[in-house]
Image (cartoon, rainbow, N blue to C red):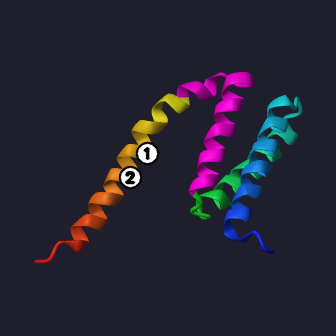
Amino acid sequence: MGYAGINGLAAFEVQFCLFIWALTLAEKSPIIKIAGWAIAGFCLYCLIFSFSRGAYAAFLIGVLYLALFKQRLLLVFMTHLPLNVEGVASERLWSSASHDVPR
């Protein structure tokens, strides 16, 4: 990983994923589009396991930029994102809080 650590790797993953995603949106060939989406998906998968909050925020800002200027359909999905994240986060918090309660 070098001197940057896991946060540096996560920052690289965000940059690479958004770069490939933007190139995929501009491509016409279906084979190259599928390959681009697969690469971006694998990068996103690696990004999830980095547990870097800064990288998550950078990814959301990058997706917002792509949604505003390149692919408007993403705005529809981004409006539902806070509802989904809140549901998952509250479930995790409740499950971890229930383990701390002495019986």
**Mark 2–mark 1 distance (CA, rounded to whole Å):** 6 Å
Q: Residue furthest left?
A: 103
What segment carries the magenta color? Answer: 53-76
Question: Where is residue 57 drawn, in percent x and y?
Answer: 59, 46
User: Which element type, helix, strand or loop, lies under badge 2?
Assistant: helix
Q: Residue at 65% across / 58% down in the picture?
A: 47
- In the displayed structure, does residue 12 sit left or right of residue 61? right
Q: In the displayed structure, would residue 27 be above or below residue 12?
A: above
Residue bearing the label numbered 1: 85
Amino acid type indicated by mark 1: Val
Question: Where is residue 50 drawn, in percent x and y?
Answer: 62, 64
Q: Residue 72 or 102: which is nearer the viewer?
A: 102
Amino acid type indicated by mark 2: Ala
Residue 13 among magenta residues: no
Disc 2 to disc 1: CB gap under 8 Å: yes
Residue bearing the label numbered 2: 89
Q: How many marks?
A: 2
- In the displayed structure, does residue 91 sit left or right of residue 47? left
Q: Residue at 22% across / 67% down in the picture?
A: 98
Residue 68 among magenta residues: yes
Q: In the displayed structure, would residue 44 be above or below residue 25?
A: below
Q: In the displayed structure, would residue 8 be above or below residue 68?
A: below
Q: Residues within 10 Å of mark 1 (few under 14, many from 20)?
A: few
Q: Residue at 80% across / 36% down in the picture?
A: 22
